Each structure stands twice: as structure tokens, then as C-alpha cells.
Amino acid sequence: MQPEACHGVPLANLEAPSAVEGLALHPDFVSEDEERELLRTVDAQPWDCTIRRRTQHYGRRFDYHNKTVGDEATPLPAEIRRLILERVDVQPALLPWRPAAGREGSLQCTVNEYPPGVGIAPHIDTHSAFEDGIASLSLGGGCAFRLRRGSDGADHSVWLPPRCLLVMSGAARYEWQHSISGRKFDRVEHRESPAGWEWVPRERRISVTLRRVLGSGTAGTGQSAW
Ligand SMILES: O=C(O)CCC(=O)C(=O)O
């Protein structure tokens, strides 16, 4: 790919931008062996093919059309519980709530699959459905994660490496839309290269996102679509 082809592709920084208050990255949240175990677990479960990305839903199910959360709860795979939920619980500073301590019925967990070229449109997770504090673990590949603030158009991208846990709370959760472009390459900061960045090919990325269901879980004047 030619350097001039970078026009319009945002540069993904290696560190969470300080301008996005409430955004935190926790690299190597799981080990490579644990990542393999989680990928094996996810790949052994059935996929929902209703939308362009394949997904899996555990805990309470989110209805993408009505922006509501259903009443029934699907049990989380034991490996997600052990390697993600229980680990978040023993580090209470990570999230404003404790995923493993709560009942399964108060949780919503989405597994998203992103083959190269597939992303997710800009959105803010529905205010009326989920509490503050959303965590997402990256498995397999990394990706550039873009945040844009509606009030002034401020725009930042950050590189999510495999095995990192991303947490959005406060302003990062409520004021900034997040998205992943449907690209096959990301432009990523690389301090040793002459240009200061490099193209990184996308690989299949799986994310495991945890949310806590708010109140009754019914949508009111919800914010943007998810
Ligand atoms: O893939 C991710 O890390 C983010 C997923 C996400 O934004 C969502 O499921 O709403």
C-alpha cells in the first residue's frame, strides 16, 4: 500500500487518548493461553447471523430493533465467567459494578465476530438499557477503535491490541460515539518506523462485551442506535 493511500484513514494511537475521559485500556488482561481457551469456547457455541457481524448473546438479550433488553437470561459459558467476569471482580477499580458478584440476570454479554473488512457503526450504547461502565475484551486480532464526540466533533482513534480490556465509563460511555471502520488495514502509530506509523492488516477479531442492565431494561428516550 502506498503512503499516499493513508488520506482519510485516522491514525490509531497506542495509548488511550487523555481527551477521552473515562476511557481505559488494560493490556494483556488475559494470557495467550487464556485467549486460545476463550476463542475455542466461543467457536464451540452457535452464532447468531441476524446482522452482518456474527454475534452471540449471553445473560439478558438485547433487541437491536426495539433497543430493549429481554427478560430471559442465557447462562454465560464457564470460561467467560472464570477468565473475564471473576477477574474483573477482583479488581474493583476497573468497572463501577461487579459482573461476577451480580446475578446473571442483571448482565448482558455480547460476543462480536469481526472478519477483516467488517466493523461496527458509530453508536453510544443505549442509555436507557445499560448502566455506566462497559467493558470489552479483544481476542484474536486487534483493531483501530474510533471515538467521536457529538458536541464538538472531537475525534480520536486508539489501537486495541489482542487480549486488552477496554473500559468506557463516564464521558467515554455517554458523550463519545464509538465505532470500528470496516477496513482490511489500520494505520497504527509505530514509533520506530520513519513515518511514525505502519499499516497493520486486520485479522479475525472477537470481542466479548459486558454491560449491566439498567432497572427494568425497557427503553425510554434512548440515545443513538446500537
Ligand atoms: O467490539 C468491540 O470492542 C465493541 C463492541 C460494541 O461496541 C458493541 O457491541 O456495541
Image (cartoon, rainbow, N blue to C red):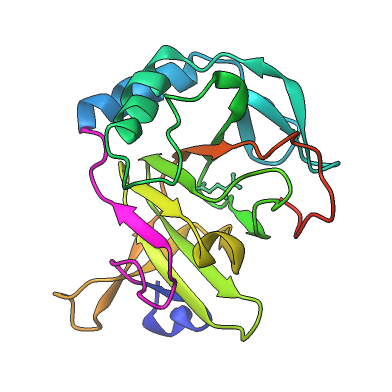
Question: How many numbered marks are there?
Answer: 0
Q: Nearer the viewer, residue 193 or 215?
A: 215
Q: Residue 175: percent from the left, percent from the top? A: 60, 69
Q: Residue at x 56, y 13 (%)?
A: 75
Q: Which residues are magenta?
A: 13-31
Residue 8 visible from this viewpoint: yes
User: What secondary structure do most residues of the magenta stretch adopt?
Assistant: loop
In the image, is residue 17 above or below residue 206? below
Q: Quadrant of residue 37?
A: top left
Q: Find residue 201 and report its horizontal and vertical position in percent.
A: 38, 56
Residue occupying the point 70% across, 28% down: 61
For image coordinates 39% across by 51% down, the residue present is: 166
Taking the image as shown, residue 121 lies to the left or right of residue 95, namely right
Q: Is residue 141 above or below residue 90?
A: below
Q: Horizontal and vertical percent for residue 73? A: 66, 18
Q: Is residue 52 magenta?
A: no
Q: Residue 187: name its quadrant.
A: bottom left
Is residue 9 among the parts visible in the rendering? Answer: no
Q: Please tell me whether residue 22 belongs to the stretch shown in magenta.
A: yes
Residue 71 % position (x, y):
76, 22
In this view, the residue farthest toward the left is 192
In the displayed structure, would residue 175 be above or below residue 76? below
